Amino acid sequence: METTLFSEFKSTFITSAHNYFSPLAKIWSFVCTSSRLETAARLQLDALNKIENKVLNLESQNRDLLGLVRSLQINQKSISLLHADFERINHEAHRIDTRISGNPMKMHSRNIRVKANLAKVRGHHVGSATNSPLQGKGAVRWKKSTKHERDQTS
Amino acid sequence: MEENTDQTKWAPKTFFFEAVSGILIFITIALAAIFLSYSVSYLEAIKFDPVIIYGLKAAEYAIFGCDLFLFAVFLFATTKKTYRGL
């Protein structure tokens, strides 16, 4: 009977000792878990900050790209307007060409004739180096002044 | 029904054993604090380094406080268990 009681007390003592110190183990595991959770939370926070920075960068890049797209659209519009102008001018030039009977060499010779007549009216030779008013036919000659004339001028 | 009666009969006995065990563990740990207290008194009497004396006092209080806390928790848990067993 005493042996049974003693063995029972012994088993109860071991269980009680385990129960006695279990709060310490719980506190310790709580502290460890808290620190692990804190570390994990800090890592996640860092990752979130990095993602936030990337998102901000992407937003700014997106804004820049939108601006570029807008300017490209404006450029495209102006290019289409210019193209329309060019087409109109080209059409007009073609119309004028066809009206002038379509012979460019004839136009060139007529221009040469007009220039030659103008030069005759002015008294110059056409197509030579004597077109200057200081040379050739009808050129203004420089005459050296005498001493008397210089004294009068001064 | 008979099993329930057995549990009711064994609950006070288990509480007694657990209480005695808890008191023994409490006294065992408290003895360390008491030994430290005596040591501190002796060291103060021989005018030992005050820094060490303060450290020993802190350890003594920490051990005794922890012991008290654990004993209180243990008694509360044992009482709860016994109350459920009754």
Image (spheres, coloured by chain):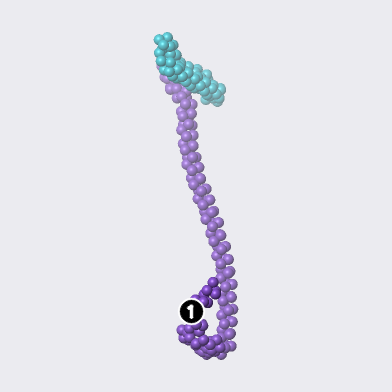
Which image quarter holds the C terminus of chain A?
bottom right
Which kind of residue does numbered mark 1 sit on?
A: Lys
Could you say which chain is coloured purple in the image? A
Q: Residue at x 50, y 50 (%)?
A: A54
Please determine whether, in this image, residue B9 is positioned above or below residue A96.
Answer: above
Rendered location of residue B9, percent (x, y): 53, 20
Q: Residue at x 43, y 15 (%)?
A: B50
Name the outermost residue toward the top: B45
Rendered location of residue B24, percent (x, y): 45, 16
Q: Nearer the viewer, residue A26 or B62?
A: B62
Rendered location of residue A117, percent (x, y): 54, 89
Q: Residue at x 54, y 61 (%)?
A: A68
Q: Nearer the viewer, residue A39 or A70?
A: A70
Residue A69 visible, this angle: yes
Q: Colour of chain B?
A: cyan
Pointer 1 residue = A144
Please determine whether, in this image, residue A82 is positioned above or below residue B83.
Answer: below
Identify the element where label 1 is drawn. loop
Q: Residues within 10 Å of mark 1 (few under 14, many from 20)?
A: few
